[in-house]
Image: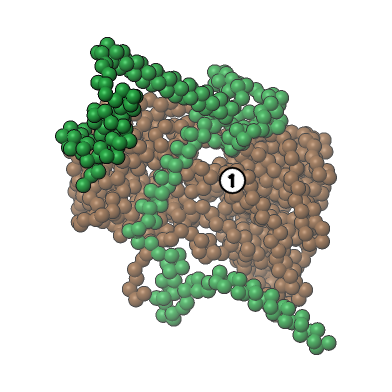
Chain colours: A green, B brown
């Protein structure tokens, strides 16, 4: 049996008395109109009534206060305005927060890019075919972690925009868009995996070179051992330990003999 | 000849990379071969199958297709999505064009030679126009569902057949749309879960499309109706390559089991006009997959994962039945990968991405002829030098005193200084090498290790002076006129005065190093130079060519020596001229000026100029004369060419000092043991 919250009735009694003793009385009332609304609203509905009741403590015998329609309407409008205000404030706060985050990201991204000088050079170089880089310009390139991209492209990797190969006194580099490189590498890996699977994957009838070359040995009139009969890679550590032990034992033997 | 102690070296772990594509050029009779590590080699088939030029490989370059276009232009395409053109004169890559279709699986040149077609990973077929200096994208054909693995043009250039996974499409070139889509059975008479990959297609002029696929079938389709005409099941494993002859009366296919089949168009009965395709000859020259085949007018060429390049002349096409019609198998490199420092007994081995420095072992025992002496000190692996970057090493050298190591890749030149203290070795790199030294084709140190000679691919020869830990660029000899015929080879005299450089069509140039000018030019010979060396005291330049001719030219006198003229007049022994492999190294004995030591892959020879020359009737390969033979017999069989076939296959042979030789061997079994797995063969009783 659900214990319904006590609903204050309009009878002029003290709030506490209402809460404590009014339970059996309010239960019946609740049974009539409270159940339809459910618990939370009954609780919400209970409070203003209680407040009213508390305010009207002195005027026990008086009739409840009359609320005109206008005042109630004004109150309601006030409520609405307040709610709207809070919502608007929340929205603006959120917007500002988002804006600040965006700016932060843009700044971080900018820090990640190559210095403008080099980007300019790249775009101009794509128009003119001659690229002449002075060693001074190359030194300007500050060796941050962004230049790892440059050094990675040192070994003739392709550029999406243009292959800029400058052979300067200090270093020569190629600018590469990493995004394209990753995509290309993964596709190349997939292609090589395809070839490997189709030639050496499951379903192909492959055997080891040792077995292949030993077929002749097996079929000869005098059966011989397989071509790679010895597995020299077996027990390397054991063999090394044994060698070391033997050396030490020999030395010890020599010493005791003397 | 004298007695020598021979260091037999077998710790050079040389494994060549497998052959991926082969392209034959009819006009110049040249063969371009691309390997799995990205190296592209050009063989001159008329110059005794000699490897003239090569382009070093790159880690990210996985070439899948190679073709010759009009005007001797070589193009390759690979899984990195780029089409590259190779410059055969400057020996570098002219440019690389990104195709934007993903990895490229196949490429074909149009019969007119002016258009290029590529098949990509995303199923698109792209057409490029070949302009005089570049290639230009023209248009896309209809996009297919799966990757285009093989392409072939119709001889008239109007249609294209493209093989993909489980189907073959026939396109019309003008409209770019697919006319027919022919579904390939996954298994000959059966069902299979594995997809059928069409590895090769060929379009004949009568509209027949021949396809080879991974189920082991060779199928003939009619492109007009899009139907299957005939199907041959020839193998249990994939059939991976196909090549059609120009006259379209024969074609060759290669399988994954290593077998190469020859199909010919023969009349049905002896006097009927109707012909049919019949499988005529199987050849089993490979142990592993045959990934590529080519059909020249007189020979079948095949190459695959077992790294051999096999050229099989067809007997019915060869006019003269002489030694030229024999099988040629090219296994060992045609250039030197090993350099030696005689003073410190060090060997430098060149691999694709690293160098190894070994010190030879020593022995204190003595013995008679033919004994194997036990080592008192084992050979020492001193240094393992890895190269930075994905490029392959082009050439390397160690100075005779052992304190300098130099090697070059396409983009950089590296020079290292070595210091030896007791048994330790320390390495220091010389920084700030000048950029014009990069992409060096040949590096050589002078005898006293003070000068470094570098032949760059631009044709210039640079002389760099070395001192202490630094260097100074002395001089650059500019390229002489004449087209580049082969890779440049260098030779320097032991007194440091003369430098010889070969490689151009003008002949071998000899430069005076002290006065820094061109001294003379040896007259041009129509076969490329395979090895060169200058004798210590007489300053005679000995040149070996790819047709096994050996010339001796006197540099101070600026003319051929008398001995050389005698040899040319008499001619070499016919067995000498029939040798398969080129001479890769020539050296001399310090105390015996009449001896020339040279070797190729299967023999080494000491030529004694004081002895008479053999004529065609004498025995060329003298067995070792037993000591109890009478003197008369020995004198009768003695001739100038002392050949020994004890150590083979030889990669390098040199004279360390008066009594010691070093022979670097590479048994074929050791190479095969490191190859990828082959197809299983079921034999009865195993």
Position in image of residue B181 (x %, y %): 22, 39
Q: Point out the image quarter for the N terminus of chain B.
A: bottom right
Identify the residue at the far bottom of this view.
A257
Q: Nearer the viewer, residue B104 or B154?
A: B104
Identify the residue at image location x=20%, y=36%.
A30
Identify the residue at image location x=31%, y=32%.
A14
Q: Is residue B507 left or right of residue B332?
A: right
Is B547 rendered above or below residue A26?
A: below
Q: Nearer the viewer, residue A35 or B573?
A: A35
Identify the residue at the far front of this view.
A61
Position in image of residue B71 (x %, y %): 47, 31
Identify the residue at image location x=61%, y=71%.
A237
Is B23 rendered above or below residue A67?
A: below
Identify the residue at image location x=33%, y=45%.
B200
Identify the residue at the far left of this view.
A32
Q: Callout 1 environment at 10 Å: few (<14), some (14 to 19), or many (20+)?
A: many
Q: Is residue B299 left or right of residue B464?
A: left
Label 1: chain? B
Q: Residue A169's quadrant in the figure?
A: top right
Position in image of residue A233 (x %, y %): 56, 69
Q: How many marks?
A: 1
Q: Nearer the viewer, residue B360 or A72?
A: A72
Position in image of residue A17 (x %, y %): 30, 36
Q: Residue B5's quadrant in the figure?
A: bottom right
Q: Residue A63's quadrant in the figure?
A: top left
Q: Is residue A134 visible?
A: yes
What residue would you read off at disc 1? B392
Q: Point out the image quarter for the C terminus of chain B.
A: bottom left
Q: Is residue B176 visible?
A: no
**Helix, strand or loop for disc 1:** loop
């Amino acid at each position: 049996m659900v214990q319904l919250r006590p609903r204050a009735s309009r009878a002029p009694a003290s709030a506490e008395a209402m809460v404590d003793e009014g339970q059996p009385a309010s239960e019946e009332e609740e049974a009539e109109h409270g159940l339809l609304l459910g618990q939370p609203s009954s609780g919400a509905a209970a409070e203003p009534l209680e407040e009213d009741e508390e305010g009207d403590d002195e005027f026990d015998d008086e009739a409840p206060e009359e609320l005109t329609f206008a005042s109630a309407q004004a109150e309601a409008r006030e409520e609405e305005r307040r709610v709207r205000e809070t919502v608007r404030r929340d929205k603006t706060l959120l917007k500002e927060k988002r804006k600040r985050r965006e700016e932060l990201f843009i700044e971080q991204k900018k820090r990640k890019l190559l210095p403008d000088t080099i980007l300019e050079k790249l775009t101009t170089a794509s128009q003119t075919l001659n690229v002449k880089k002075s060693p001074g310009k190359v030194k300007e390139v500050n060796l941050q972690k962004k230049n790892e991209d440059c050094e990675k492209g040192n070994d003739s990797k392709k550029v999406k925009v243009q292959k800029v190969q400058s052979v300067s006194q200090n270093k020569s580099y190629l600018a590469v868009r990493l995004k394209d490189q990753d995509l290309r590498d993964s596709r190349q890996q997939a292609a090589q995996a395809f070839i490997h699977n189709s030639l050496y994957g499951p379903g192909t009838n492959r055997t080891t070179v040792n077995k292949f070359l030993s077929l002749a040995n097996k079929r000869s009139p005098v059966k011989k051992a397989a071509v790679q009969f010895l597995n020299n890679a077996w027990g390397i550590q054991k063999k090394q330990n044994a060698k070391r032990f033997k050396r030490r034992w020999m030395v010890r033997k020599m010493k005791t003999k003397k | 000849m004298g007695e020598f102690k021979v260091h037999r070296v077998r710790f050079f772990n040389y494994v060549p990379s497998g052959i991926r594509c082969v392209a034959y050029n009819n006009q110049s009779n040249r063969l371009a071969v691309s390997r799995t590590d990205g190296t592209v080699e050009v063989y001159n088939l008329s110059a005794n199958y000699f490897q003239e030029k090569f382009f070093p490989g790159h880690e990210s370059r996985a070439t899948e297709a190679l073709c010759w276009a009009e005007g001797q232009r070589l193009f390759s395409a690979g899984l990195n999505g780029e089409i590259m053109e190779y410059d055969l004169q400057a020996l570098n890559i002219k440019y690389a064009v990104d195709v934007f279709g993903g990895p490229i699986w196949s490429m074909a040149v149009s019969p007119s030679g002016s258009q290029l077609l590529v098949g990509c990973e995303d199923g698109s077929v792209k057409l490029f126009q070949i302009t005089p200096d570049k290639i230009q994208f023209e248009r896309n054909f209809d996009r297919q569902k799966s990757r285009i693995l093989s392409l072939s043009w119709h001889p008239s250039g109007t249609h294209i057949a493209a093989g993909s996974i489980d189907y073959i499409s026939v396109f019309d070139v003008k409209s770019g749309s697919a006319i027919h889509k022919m579904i390939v059975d996954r298994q000959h008479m059966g069902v299979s879960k594995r997809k059928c990959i069409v590895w090769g297609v060929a379009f004949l002029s009568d509209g027949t499309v021949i396809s080879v696929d991974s189920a082991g079938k060779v199928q003939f389709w009619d492109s007009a109706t899009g139907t299957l005409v005939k199907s041959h099941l020839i193998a249990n494993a994939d059939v991976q390559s196909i090549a059609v002859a120009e006259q379209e009366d024969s074609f060759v296919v290669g399988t994954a089991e290593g077998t190469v089949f020859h199909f010919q168009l023969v009349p049905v009965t002896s006097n009927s006009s109707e012909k049919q395709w019949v499988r005529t000859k199987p050849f089993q020259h490979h142990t592993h997959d045959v990934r590529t085949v080519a059909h020249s007018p007189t020979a079948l060429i095949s190459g695959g994962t077992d790294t051999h390049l096999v050229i099989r002349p067809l007997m019915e096409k060869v006019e003269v039945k002489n030694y030229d019609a024999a099988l040629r198998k090219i296994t060992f490199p045609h250039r030197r990968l090993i350099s030696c420092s005689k003073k410190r007994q060090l060997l430098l081995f060149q691999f694709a991405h690293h160098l190894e420095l070994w010190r030879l072992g020593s022995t204190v025992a003595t013995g008679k002829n033919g004994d194997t002496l036990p080592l008192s000190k084992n050979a020492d692996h001193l240094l393992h030098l890895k190269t930075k970057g994905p490029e392959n090493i082009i050439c390397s050298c160690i100075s005779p005193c052992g304190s300098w190591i130099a090697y070059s890749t396409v983009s950089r030149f590296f020079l290292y200084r070595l210091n030896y203290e007791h048994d330790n070795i320390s390495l220091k790199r010389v920084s700030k090498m000048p950029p014009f030294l990069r992409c060096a084709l040949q590096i050589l140190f002078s005898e006293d290790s003070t000068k470094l000679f570098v032949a760059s691919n631009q044709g210039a020869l640079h002389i760099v002076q070395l001192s202490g830990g630094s260097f100074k660029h002395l001089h650059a000899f500019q390229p002489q006129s004449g087209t580049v015929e082969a890779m440049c080879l260098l030779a320097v005299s032991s007194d440091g005065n003369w430098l010889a450089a070969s490689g151009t069509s003008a002949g071998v140039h000899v430069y005076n190093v002290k006065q820094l000018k061109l001294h003379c030019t040896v007259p041009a010979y129509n076969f490329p130079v395979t090895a060169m060396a200058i004798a210590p005291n007489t300053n005679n330049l000995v040149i070996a060519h790819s047709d096994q001719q050996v010339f001796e030219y006197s540099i101070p006198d600026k003319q051929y020596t008398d001995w050389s003229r005698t040899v040319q007049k008499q001619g070499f022994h016919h067995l000498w001229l029939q040798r398969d492999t080129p001479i890769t190294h020539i050296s001399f004995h310090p105390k015996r000026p009449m001896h020339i030591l040279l070797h190729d892959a299967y023999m080494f020879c000491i030529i004694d100029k004081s002895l008479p020359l053999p004529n065609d009737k004498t025995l060329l390969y003298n067995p070792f004369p037993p000591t109890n033979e009478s003197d008369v017999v020995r004198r009768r069989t003695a001739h100038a060419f002392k050949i020994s076939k004890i150590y083979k296959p030889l990669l390098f042979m040199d004279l360390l000092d008066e009594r010691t030789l070093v022979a670097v061997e590479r048994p074929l079994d050791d190479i095969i043991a490191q190859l990828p797995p082959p197809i299983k063969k079921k034999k009865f009783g195993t």
